[in-house]
Amino acid sequence: MTFDAGNRLIAAIDTPARAEADALIARLGGVPSWLKLGLELFCAEGPGIVSDIVGRGHRVMLDLKLHDIPETVGRAAARVATLGAGLLTIHASGGRAMMEAAVKGAGATRVLAVTILTSMDAQDLVDVGFGGSVEDAVVKLAQLAQRAGCAGVVASPKEIRLIREAVGPNFLIVTPGIRPADSQAGDQKRVMTPREARAAGADLVVVGRPLRDAADPSAAARAVVAELS
Ligand code: C5P
């Protein structure tokens, strides 16, 4: 089971180094179902931090957003598979063969494909040579990820309904850009509350700063879990 239906919260551990990550994990008090480790921490500390955190009993989503030729991504995914992370991210725009190689290399680690980065708009797509709307690209990439054997996608809350219609129920939709009603949006422009994201069809939600910067991160995480269930 990739997630616990009673706890759909992934906490983003967006910290510069191990000491801050350990402190945040301790302050979260084991409330989130998953911890998301990203490029910042991975580049600072190396892969050992992933196996350490997994070894302490946490489920880890390793957010590396891999994108390269299929051979390279497959081999990198095989290295990730030895770390014990439950989820690994790649870019769907790397194409079907790249996604298939990632899925094969990752073994028991399930692969999530990022469709279109939430930081990109229609003009950015034109600039990189993609035609059509953001929505069309997201749906096409989600369907391609499903055919390639990915477990799901990472997408903006705004796109959850469209993706769900296109891929059916048995494909994970994981969404960042979540803000509890009483918190600051920060640089996330198209936000939803945990309850809205769940109602739209998200399986798991990623929350970063509203937990990291809370006076009581475990209480803030409990409030999000309650809203999601
Ligand atoms: O602090 P905040 O809740 O905005 O953090 C969201 C997390 O999700 C960050 O780790 C960010 O890198 C990540 N993310 C995102 N949008 C994406 C993919 C990942 O905000 N499309």
Image: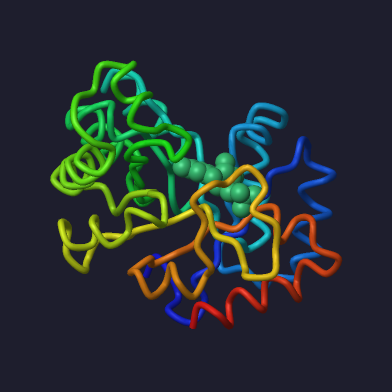
The figure's colour scheme reads: rainbow
Check the image and name the residue furthest to the front.
123
Is 200 placed left or right of 45 in the picture? left
Residue 196 picture location, percent across and down: 45, 71
Is 215 placed left or right of 99 in the picture? right
Residue 27 picture location, percent across and down: 81, 64
Is 169 placed left or right of 54 in the picture? left
Is 117 placed left or right of 26 in the picture? left
The foreground one among 192 and 220 is 192
The foreground one among 2 and 6 is 6
Residue 86 picture location, percent across and down: 45, 54
Question: Eyeballing the image, is 64 above or below 83?
Answer: above
Q: Quadrant of residue 136?
A: top left
The foreground one among 134 and 49 is 134
Question: Eyeballing the image, is 1 above or below 47?
Answer: below
User: Residue 83: in sight, yes or no?
Assistant: no
Question: Eyeballing the image, is 80 above or below 124?
Answer: below
Residue 148 picture location, percent across and down: 17, 41
Question: Eyeballing the image, is 62 above or below 124?
Answer: below
User: Residue 122: in sight, yes or no?
Assistant: yes
Q: Residue at x 55, y 67 (%)?
A: 9
Q: Residue at x 61, y 61 (%)?
A: 58
Q: Residue at x 33, y 69 (%)?
A: 201
